[in-house]
Image (tube, grey):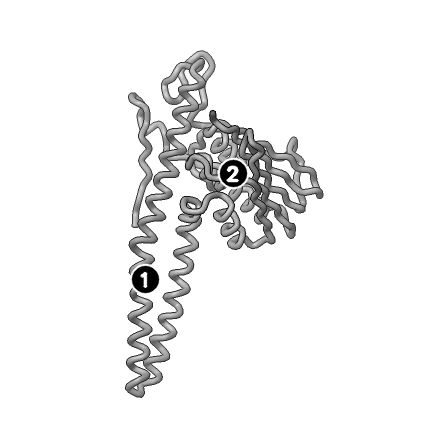
Amino acid sequence: MNHRAEAELPDGIDRGRMGGLPHDGANGQGQLSAADCIATRPGGPGLFGFDDSSAASRLRAAQRLVAAGDAERQRIERDLHDGVQQRLTALRVRLELAAHGFEARGDKEAGAALSELGHELEQATEELRAFAHGIYPALLTSGGLGPALASAATRVPEHVSVLARAVRRYRPEVETAVYFSCLAAMDNAARHAGPAQVMVSVWDDGRALRFTIRDTGRGFAPRRTRIGAGITNMRDRIAAVGGTLTVDSTPAHGTRVEGAVPHVS
């Protein structure tokens, strides 16, 4: 399956200058983040050809890019679920029926071989399901942030606890931005914090949707550490929905990622 995200760009924008959609991976080479997409040159037009004074235009352009990427994520997840996963599940059932048929006729060796193939196919289906969940979790659409984050926590190697308080349903773009920012922070902790506990908290204080991801790992010195693409992408996502995100860390005392998205009246 070969799908490529094509963002709807403002009139007059040359797609060749874009290099591709922003993504959440840690590899920043050859890719543009939303921050890159709204970068400007002093005294001249920005990358999108907007006047540098038009911050609102740059923000809208970044929002459209993020929205296009998220829509493509959802489409790929649906294609995997409705297409490949369903066919693999049907094939698993057929193999099991065939195995029972051979065993009933006394050919236990063939039945056992087919049954083993069925189990391997089931494992491959589970791996594909986990992959599709990482692209865009259907649970985020159906259940919201709390259930989606709790499910994601079971798929990371470190011990992660999730606490969601007074969290309701929000605009899809807000839920998506917060979910993938939390996911990226959990992934960063798994890769860089060392043996540690990770605590994810999401709550609504009536004025904003807030979230924190804290770990008890090795931490780092922010002033002496280059900010990577992962943190940049988190900030871009939250900024695109009108929020803010900060990262605080101290060597040997863990890292804290904190974000807030104010409610739009």
Q: Is residue 100 above or below residue 246?
A: below
Q: Which of 231 and 205 is in front in this view?
A: 205
**10 vs 71, nearest the viewer:** 71
The residue that disc 1 covers is: 88
From the top left corner, tell me how far across and down residue 213 is, in percent: 59, 41
157 horizontally vs 77: left or right = right
Q: In the displayed structure, does residue 78 sit left or right of residue 23?
A: left
Relative to 154, 123 lies left or right: left
Is residue 13 depicted above or below 100 in this figure?
A: above
Q: Relative to the observer, which residue lies in front, 79 or 189? A: 79
Q: What residue type is labelled 1?
A: Leu
Query: In the image, which disc is placed on residue 46?
Result: none
In the displayed structure, does residue 186 sit left or right of residue 75?
A: right
Residue at image point 33% right, 44% down:
75
Provide residue 10's location: percent of width, then percent of height: 32, 24
Q: Which residue occupies 41% across, 46% down?
A: 142
Q: Image height check: is 156 above or below 176?
A: below
Give the labeled residue for mark 2.
230
Q: Position of residue 57 (x, y in %)?
A: 40, 19
Residue 100 pos. (x, y %): 32, 79
